Image: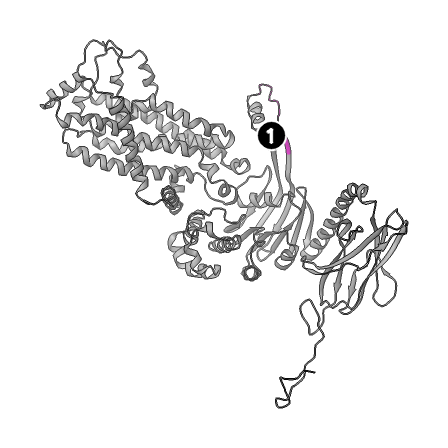
Amino acid sequence: MAKPSVSVKDLGKCYKIYPDARHRMKEWLSPTRKSYHEEKWALRGINFDLYPGQALGIVGINGAGKSTLLKILTGTSTQTTGNYQLDGSVSSLLELGAGFHPEFSGKQNIYMNAAIQGISKTQVDQQYEEIAAFTELGSALSRPVRTYSSGMAMRLGFAASMLVDPDVLILDEVLAVGDAHFQKKCMDQFTTFRNQNKTILFVSHSVFHVREICDRVIWIHDGEMVMDGDANAVTDEYETKLLEHQRPAMASVDEAAELKMGLAKIKGFDVMKPNGGGVFTEQEPIEIGTNDDLVVRLRVQHPEAGAELYPMIAVLRNDGLLVVSTRPEQAVRASGGEDIVELRLSDLRILGGEYYFNLYLADGSGTHIVDQMLHARRFKVRSRHFEKGIYLSDYSYRVVDAASADPGTSS
Amino acid sequence: MGLIAQCLRFREMVVSFTRRDLQQRYVGSVLGWPWPFIQPLMMLGVYYLVFNVLLDIKVPPAWREQMAQRLGLEADSAAVGSFQVIVLCCGLIPWLATAEFLVRSAGVILESGSMVKKVRFPSEILPVALIGSYVINMVILFTVFLAFTWGLTLFRSPLFWLFPVVVVLHLMFMLGLGFLLATANVFVRDVGQLVPIFINLWFFLSPIVYLREMLVNSEGEPATWLWVFDWNPLTYLMDLYRWTLVFPEEIRLTIDRSGQENIWIEVGMTDVFRELGIFAAIAISLYFIGYHVFMANKHRFADEL
């Protein structure tokens, strides 16, 4: 294989954390070299090679060390251990508007940004029209950047980072604020990039974007690499883990709520196979077709017999779009033991894609959630041949004879 | 000399940052671009009002008489009278640039914090770009000043050819200190609080709005603490600016070290080169120390912001 464009070896970063500024002074002045700081390893043992044409996604929860890694690769921060090599020119966009001056116009900022990156004015002059067109900001380019929305700033920042025509592009969570149209444009740009055999490093909280852009993903947790591999495999695993993290967190919230709410709890659930045939096991991937029923048997518990409960289900697409959320018309009365409530979404008219559902349990008021399972289970809806989108409507086509078309009547 | 190479490579950045700094001092104001130039002029006016009108600090009359005599003029002639103003401007113009630059340099890294953290660029450019905007100010004021004094043919220094050397040394001095302050303030923010106070003290302890020779006690003897000036680099800088800009060597005013009588003492070239040598040594070493300290620590800036 070719020479790697990014090569990272045993990279580590340790921050010294001082309780406040005085402790640093004390440490400097300490005759006994007493230590007044705590060490916090933000990154440890990061290893990977990235080859031209690859796009690497980095996922992980907040504080996992993703941004620290990008800062080191960008060169603004220095590693404590290990080393890295970057082959070719690098451009990075770690923060929207970093290096932008709010009082100056978009155009002036493009030039200034270029100057920071060591690009000559004549070179910017040549490319300016193209960049201006890419931002689609039009006359706004002559207005001060402080008047820009975050989406506009993102367009400007993204376009400016394209100026250098880098071999390696480093991006940190920059697509989040753009509108769908511009996001699409950026994604197309990334594809072009990769086709030109350039390398992308991309951090995002949007697993959707990571899957879309990257072919390889590294999952970082607590500064260490948990997984490195195929984008879909890693992000699937990451999402699953995220859900596991969320559940105990929910449970602890519940404990406080339990006292108040009378111990109502979701004990568990089963997803029924659409055409009879029992339940889906925990490991079994759920795949249904459009127009199938989604049947979830929810096991709820309330120690007080006769207490009112509202079990609810919401279906969401994997990017978080709410497809439908439901609420029963009438409360379920608890028996005092474990009750099984069947939630049935009949004739689910959603089209092919990845979805998941959330389960909620509300108290007698019907609005106060006392227990919930977010991302309770993922399921896939098989793609159909002709229809695209989310929702499947009944439809028909017919040829209407112009002569018999009578706008006055309808049938 | 890595800095010069870096500045050349990133010259567009230096230029645009300098311009940005000049611009942001007036952006949004009604008057606009003349502000960076009018402001120091107004400051000169304020200092003149306070020190020459209200406090009425005067060149001792005996000096004026002797100077007039020597120049073959009346002691109360306008030319001799303007001497006071010229001495004041000569010290204030470089001082204003120094003071403002040093105060701002302490904050230069913090001000550009988001950039230092998120953008890869040579941050040593920041103090250079900052000094640029004050140098432009200084040069413009000096041009106005020279146009004025050279019109008064009395105040033409035969040492003017040394003026550019003095300016370069002055810049190295400022930049060295600026690098040190910028670095220190990243790690100990208290520095930024102390700088304006220190600058104020420094102003009064330097022969800027007065001449050393004016500091006499009630008996007309030199003040006992004049030795302080020997340890103040600004003393040499101010001397050098005055010698190269206004004072013909033979009319440098000073008093007899025996302290009895005001007399003329001629400043020979040895005095000029002695002070030039001392200041050059200070400025050049400060520059290299400052630059070295900044470069050795800059990789830690992003983590501290």
What is the x, y in percent for residue B43?
30, 32
Residue extent of the magenta highlight:
A30-39
Provide the residue designation for mark 1. A18
> Most prominent secondary structure in the magenta stretch?
loop
Query: What residue is drawn where x is 17% and y is 14%?
Result: B263
Front residue of B83 and A165: B83
Q: B91 or B162: which is nearer to us?
A: B91
Instruction: Look at the image and say whether residue A48 sits in the magenta stretch.
Output: no
Mark 1, chain letter? A
In the displayed structure image, the side of residue A119 where residue A355 appears, left or right? right
Decide if residue A347 is in sight here: yes
Could you tell me the amino acid type at mark 1? Tyr
Q: Is residue A17 above or below residue A397?
A: above
Identity of the residue drawn at 29% across and 23% down: B236
List x then y, in percent, for residue B183.
47, 32
Callout 1: few (<14), some (14-19), or many (20+) C-alpha neighbours within 10 Å? some
- Badge count: 1
Q: Evaluate whether residue A127 shows in this view.
A: no
